[in-house]
Image (spheres, grey):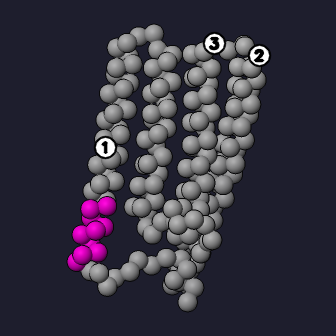
């Protein structure tokens, strides 16, 4: 039973592979949208506001693709094994992974708000949308602050304890 539970961490391969496929798909879609938008702008087939909205949509797609890639790499690093990737892509625990994800959600929300602002015909709806985006952003920022504060407090109380990573389990 112990062996089965210890090896169950490899179930994370499913999430890693799914996120890699989603990331690749989002990158391809982002490139496709960018090419079609640039062609439409070059041929003067898109009005300025609509072109800007379309360009923000391309940015949004690339941000989402990048977030999925970072989460996929982080899941692999946490549960399966060591990777040779930049330090900013690595996480030490699930809270840190959630924090990284939150820092991607905020720019995506900002892009969506700008799209809404540029395409909106009703000022009150835009105001409500902006307030909702601001509240979610503040909530995510508070979550990140509290998580980081708890981690720092825990390190002060138990400085000798280190977190266990997948690479540590191999030894």
Of the two numbered discs 1 and 3 on the same chain, state the one appearing first in sequence.
3
Q: Which residue is mark 2?
A: 43
Pointer 3: residues within 10 angstroms few (<14), some, or many (20+)? Answer: few
Residue at 57%, 23% (x, y): give it.
53
Between 117 and 128, the residue placed more toward the observer is 117
Which percent across, then down, holds residue 31? 71, 37
Residue at 31%, 35% (x, y): give it.
135
Between 62 and 94, the residue placed more toward the observer is 62
**What's drawn in magenta, residue-wise?**
148-157
Determine contact: label 1, label 2, CB under 8 Å. no
* Relative vertical location of residue 78 with respect to residue 128 in this rendering, above or below: below
Badge 1 element: helix
Q: Which residue is mark 3?
A: 47
**Per the image, is 4 magenta?**
no
Q: What secondary structure prevails in the magenta region?
A: helix
Q: Mark 1 against mark 2, which lies toward the viewer?
A: 2
Q: Which residue is mark 1?
A: 139
Residue at 66%, 55% (x, y): give it.
20
């Amino acid at each position: 039973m112990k062996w089965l539970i210890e090896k169950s961490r490899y179930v994370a391969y499913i999430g890693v592979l799914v996120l890699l496929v989603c990331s690749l798909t989002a990158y391809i879609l982002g490139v496709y949208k960018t090419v079609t938008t640039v062609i439409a702008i070059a041929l003067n087939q898109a009005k300025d506001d609509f072109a800007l909205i379309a360009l923000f949509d391309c940015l949004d797609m690339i941000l989402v693709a990048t977030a999925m890639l970072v989460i996929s790499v982080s899941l692999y690093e946490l549960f399966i094994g060591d990777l040779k990737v930049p330090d900013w892509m690595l996480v030490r625990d699930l809270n840190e992974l959630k924090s990284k994800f939150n820092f991607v959600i905020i720019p995506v929300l900002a892009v969506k708000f700008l799209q809404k602002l540029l395409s909106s015909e009703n000022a009150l709806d835009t105001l409500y949308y902006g307030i909702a985006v601001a509240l979610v952003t503040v909530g995510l920022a508070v979550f990140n602050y509290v998580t980081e504060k708890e981690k720092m407090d825990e390190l002060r109380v138990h400085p000798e304890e280190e977190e266990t990573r997948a690479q540590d389990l191999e030894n």
